[in-house]
Amino acid sequence: MQYDLSVICPVSRDRGDLARVHSEFADAVARSGRRAEFIYILDGPLADAEQAMARIHEDRFPVTVLRMAKGFGEATALQVGFNRARGRHVVTIPAWLQIHADVVLDVLARLDDGASVVITHREPRSDAWFNRLQSRVFHGLVRRLVGQNFRDMTCGVRGMTLEAARKLDLYGDQHRFIPVIAVRCGYHVVEVAGPQHHENRKLRLSGPGIYVRRLLDVLNIYFLTRFTRKPLRFFGLIGSAIGLVGFVICAYLAAFKLFGALALSGRPLLLLGVLLIVLGVQITSIGLLGEIIIFLSARREQPEVAETSRSNAEQDTPVAGTS
């Protein structure tokens, strides 16, 4: 059966009251008058989450609960939901009350206007100042490295066409970078504002390891968006810089040797210079191998192309050899 809308919610250990989450978003979708389905994807065997889903009594929309064999992460859960969705449009929601559910109506309105990807941002922000500081640092780092300026990429309410959703090809922790990935795929991303839910105001403080992982995620998305189709530029730049330092060191020592002012035997600096030159060549070779793999790969990334107009003369032009 074809639906107007598929609402997808990834459920992990970090979640709120699922029955209340479903009730608020189902009410918002019902006000839109859409024929919709709800898909919940459990990130691994979560017995208490399954019990919570069993307590949901819904007679307006069909509810499907999927469970992954083990925890693969929210991004993978979303991709599973995208592949199972049967709606013309897709809306993702978080497993906790992060933003007022009424923002879904604004998201659907933008999709009806022709937008391919719509994200939301919590405005005004009313949570703890440390939460807002973390968000500013995160988005500032993404803006500097990736060049995309989004206000609230971590807000879980997003809307997109089914085609765009399936083309994102998410994995790992890439759910936080859906707007960046959508821009890379050629889609125009629209932002809409919605009030932050009052239950989303508590302080969120993570351990040092989590912040290191977030930094690595940002570096990962920087590489994927900038250099996956031209890896030689990335590895070549690093390799050339390292090799140049090694060359300067060796040239410095060679100059002193030629003028008889310095003996090269037993000089650790010489070993360092040679090591840097070799390391620079190796790093540059990695980029060259990446370019060869991309060139020989049978699976090429295709740009998003939309037909905007067609000349009537094209249809009327007779084919050669016909009368």
Image (spheres, grey):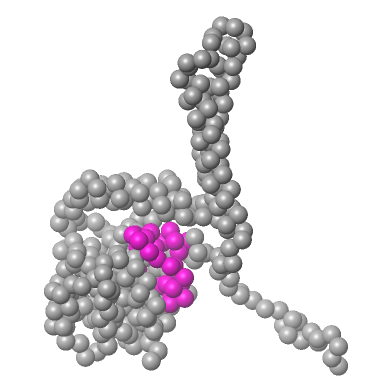
Residue 26 point in image, percent of width and height: 24, 81
- Residue at horizontal 20%, vertical 73%? 45
- Residue at horizontal 40%, vertical 48%? 219
Q: Residue 303 occupies which quadrant of the picture?
A: bottom right
**Count of picture labels:** 0
Q: Residue 34 occupies which quadrant of the picture?
A: bottom left
Indicate whether residue 161 is drawn in magenta: yes
Residue 200 can be seen, yes or no: yes
Which image quarter holds the C terminus?
bottom right
Start-end of magenta stretch: 158-183
Residue 56 point in image, percent of width and height: 16, 83
Residue 148 point in image, percent of width and height: 44, 53
- Residue at horizontal 26%, vertical 67%? 71
Compared with 61, 166 (above or below) is above
Which residue is at the front of the view, 91 or 244? Answer: 244
The secondary structure that most of the magenta stretch takes on is helix
Indicate whether residue 150 is drawn in magenta: no
Residue 43 can be seen, yes or no: no
User: 318 left or right of 107?
Assistant: right
